[in-house]
Amino acid sequence: MAPVLRLAILLVLCSCFFSNTSSFVQRRTPTQPKNNSYRNVAYYVNWAIYERQFFPQEILADKLTHVLYAFANIDPETGTVFLSDQNADTDLRFQNDPIGNADSNLYGCLKQLYILKKKNRHLKVLLSVGGWTYSANFATPAGTASGRSTFALSAVSLVQNLGLDGLDIDWEYPADVTQANNFVLLLQAVRNALDAYGNSLSPPYHFTLTIACPAGPSNYEKLLIAEMDQYVDFWNLMAYDYVWSGSLKTGHQANLFSASDESTPFNTLTAVNYYTSKGVAPQNIVLGMPIYGRVFDATAGAGLPFVGVGPGQWEVGVYDFKALPLAGAKEHFDSKLGLSYSYDATKREFISYDNIAVVNQKAAWIQKMELGGAMWWESSADALGSKSLITSVYLVLGGKNGLGLDNTPNTLSYPDSDYDNIRAGMPDVSSPSEYTSTLTKSAILSATTCTITLTTTITLPDQCTCTTF
């Protein structure tokens, strides 16, 4: 039976879950990792292969439990979920891939992620849908039963075709109670579609459903958190971007605790307490941390006026962690507030970012609060070796051998995939390919078409994330 037809039949069998109603099915308990172990989750962005020159093979797969592949888009009318960059996602050829041959195999970043799964059976790969740029496309299809059904059907078809372990929904953000209610219904549809497909396999497999959730009160207070929680395996708390280029004053972007002055408008503890007060189990909250710094120029420090944010690295006002601290800047760590930053007194430049000291503090805080682990935006910005933030937290949460991390196995069985090599499980491949054979890294950038559109955001909610994505 054709894969899409098979999935469609499964969805018809559970069509009662797609009705436009505010009454929800009996509460289910999200699947827990074995031994209540920690998750170490990182986003990998499909535009990383271009200017950033960061490839899936460079992901710290042995130190992560989940990779969230960002982003898939949504048709704003029908709700169809589709990949956003065909070249990066499915077409780009790496070393050992045939060049120029038309066939029915999967290539691109998604092939390399499947190979990483084969080598690291604890690693689960999820497709992240939405993000800042595409979030405007959620509202209309989420508002109808047919739109939600199409969203769920198409998203799960991508899971089964691309060899993935689940979905991450990143809607930034539902604007009112109607959209919040529709978000619950959308999660319900996706959860049941994933379960229908997973239960059709032999043996059955539980596909993971997560969401990227806000840490700003004006956004999380709109959500129907208790109703959402029954469908979500875990919540990726975007505990960063508390300040940005549009803020009125310089500030800290990812502090754990509240400040008595005006150096930061938000804090992570308040957000975590809000989610748990609405019934989310602490072990289902994964603490997001930034692997980048936000820049403020012509300022005397946090909580004070600034003029401009500087050119940044890949986008205005933002630097990768691996480039920090900049030459001439002095780094500071404040354990009382749970934050770090650098300041260049000569240039009068303030940069808010998480360094090794503060992520280690946050990892210890995750343990103290019995949270579910760590999440990172995003993997291409991390430093190497002993300077890696991801590795640092891995050592705290997982221990030297990673035994404290979630080792729930992924699946490699996708009998209904449209791709021959995914259906076959890539029997002839045991390790990730090198970057390229006949092409160099720089040639990839010049020889392929980048479909990523960077945008300049004029106004944002009070707590924002991924302002250029």
Image (cartoon, helix red, strand yellow):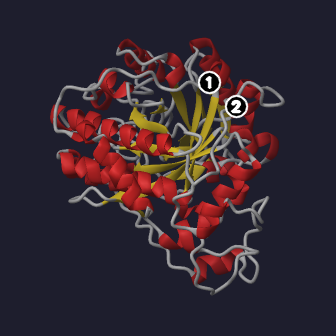
In this view, the residue farthest toward the front is: 1
Q: Quadrant of the image for the N terminus? A: bottom left
Q: Which mark is residue 63?
A: none
Disc 1 target residue: 362
Instruction: Look at the numbered discs 2 and 1 and tell me whether their residues touch, using CB distance below 8 Å.
Output: yes
| Tag count | 2
| Element carrying mark 1 | helix
Q: Amino acid at mark 2?
A: Val
Q: Amino acid at mark 1?
A: Lys
Residue at 61%, 26% (x, y): give it. Answer: 33
Q: Nearer the viewer, residue 274 or 87?
A: 87
Foreground mark, 2 or 1, reads: 2
Q: Is residue 166 above or below residue 2?
A: above
Disc 2 target residue: 393
| Element carrying mark 2 | helix
Residue at 16%, 33% (x, y): give it. Answer: 21
Q: Nearer the viewer, residue 445 or 195?
A: 195
Q: Residues within 10 Å of mark 2 (few under 14, many from 20)?
A: many
Q: Nearer the viewer, residue 236 or 409?
A: 409
